[in-house]
Amino acid sequence: MSVRMIKKSWWIDFRANHTRHRKRSPENSRTGALAYEAMLRQKLARGESMDRAERKDPVFEKFAAKWFEDYVIPNNKPSEQKHKKYVLSASLVPFFGKMLVGQITSYHVDQYKAQLVKEGIANKTIKNRLTILNKCLITAYEWLQLEGTPPKIKWPKCAPPHMRYLSPDECELFLSHTEGVIHEMILTALRTGMRQGEIRGLQWSSIDWERRELTVRHSLCDIAKALVPPKSNRERYIPLDSDVYEALYERKKSTGYVFLDADGKPFDHKRAGRRLTKIRKSVGLDKEKIGWHTFRHTFASRLVTKGVQLNRVQALLGHSSILTTMRYAHLAPTDLREAIDTLNPRHVLNESFGQPVGNQWIQKQKQEIVEKIAVAKKL
C-alpha cells in the first residue's frame, strides 16, 4: 500500500524513478495521506524537489508570536487580545511550541484535548482554546503557503449555557432598592438590553431627544482605558422607553459620559460590579449569580415572551448572528400546544365545514339530551 498507519500516524510510502519516498502525512487521516501522496507525485512529475529542508514552516511558538503581532493586535479588541495572549502563553505554546506548524496533526490536537480533560478543564474552555489554535493554524497555512490542509479538529460537546433572567417582580425589586445614577443604569440595562461596557461608555451625544432613541456607538474598555467600538463593530439604534427617556432628560447634557460615579469618573468594570453586588445583598439575592449581563438576558427574554420576532430582538441586542438570539427562542409563545391539541377529536377541524369537531360533538350531546327530555315528557 502507498499509505499506511504507523504508530497512530498516517504515512505515505511509494517508489518513483527508482527512489523510495516515505513521509508522514501532515493530515493524520487516510484521506489526508492519499491527498498528500497525490500532491507529492505531482511535484515529482513537475521535476520539483521534495527535500524536507525546503519546508517553510517554523515551530509553533515562533509563528504564534508573529500571528499575535500581525493578526490578533490589528484585528481584535484589547479584551480579546488579552485573552488570546493568555491562552497562547499558558496553554497552547507549552504543548505545541516545539512542533513545526505543518507537522501538527489531528492526533496531536486530540492529545492536547485529552490533557485538558485530565486537568479538569470544562468543555467550553477547551472549545475556546481550540478555536484560537484553529485560527492560528489556518492563518499559518495561508501565510506560509504550506502543503496540505490544517488538521481537522473534533470539537467537544458543550451543554447549552444556563441563562439567568429576572422575573418582573425581581426587576421591580432591584429598581425599588436603588436610586440616583445606579438606578438609572439598571433601568437602562433592563429597558435597552445594552451590554455593561456600552452602558458605562454611553455618551450624551449618542441620544437623539427628538427621535427618542439612542445610538450604541461605543463601549468603555478597561484595558485600553478608552472608548472602543461595540461588539461586532456595529452601531445600532434603540428606541427609548418613556421611563428611561424621562429619567435621562431631567439631567441631559450635550457632551460627556451619561453615567458618572459620585467622584465624577466613569464606572469601570470592577466598580460597577461592586455596586451591583451590594444591591444584590440588600434585596436578598446575594446567593444568586446575577450580574450586569443578567439585565441584558432579562431584556431579551421579556421581549421574546411578549411575542416580539427574533429578528427584531437580534437587531436590538446587536447580535451578529441570529443563532445567538435563538438561545431565547424557547421562551416565545409557541404553537406546540396547538399542535398537540390537534390530536384530540374535539379540536380537529372538520374539512367540510371548517368547524371544530368538538363543537359538533357538543351540539350532538345537547340534541340527545333534548330528545331524551321530550321522550320523558310524553311518558
Image: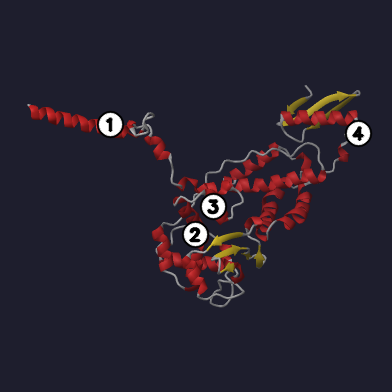
Q: At numbered mark 3, what does the secondary structure look like: helix, strand or loop?
A: helix
> What percent of the width, then of the height, locates residue 277?
48, 65
Disc on the earlier residue, 3 or 2: 2
Pinpoint residue 345: horizontal percent, then vertical percent: 33, 30
Q: CA separation, marks 3 and 2?
A: 18 Å
**Where residue 133 is drawn, which disc sits there?**
none
Which residue is depicted at the point 78% across and 53% down?
66
Secondary-structure class at tag 2: helix
Residue named by callout 4:
48
- Kindly report the distance in space between the C-alpha atoms of the residues bearing marks 1 and 2: 49 Å
The earlier-in-sequence mark between 1 and 2 is 2
The tag on residue 312 is: 3
**Residue 172 relative to residue 105: left or right:** left
SS state under label 1: helix
Instruction: Give the number of the disc on residue 295.
Output: 2
Q: CA distance from mark 2 to mark 4?
A: 62 Å
Mark 1 is surrounded, within 10 Å at the Cα level, by few (under 14), some (14 to 19) or many (20 or more) other residues, namely: few
Residue appearing at x 48%, y 73% in the figure? 180
Packing grade of label 4 (10 A; few <14, some 14-19, many >=20) is few
Q: Quadrant of the C terminus?
A: top left
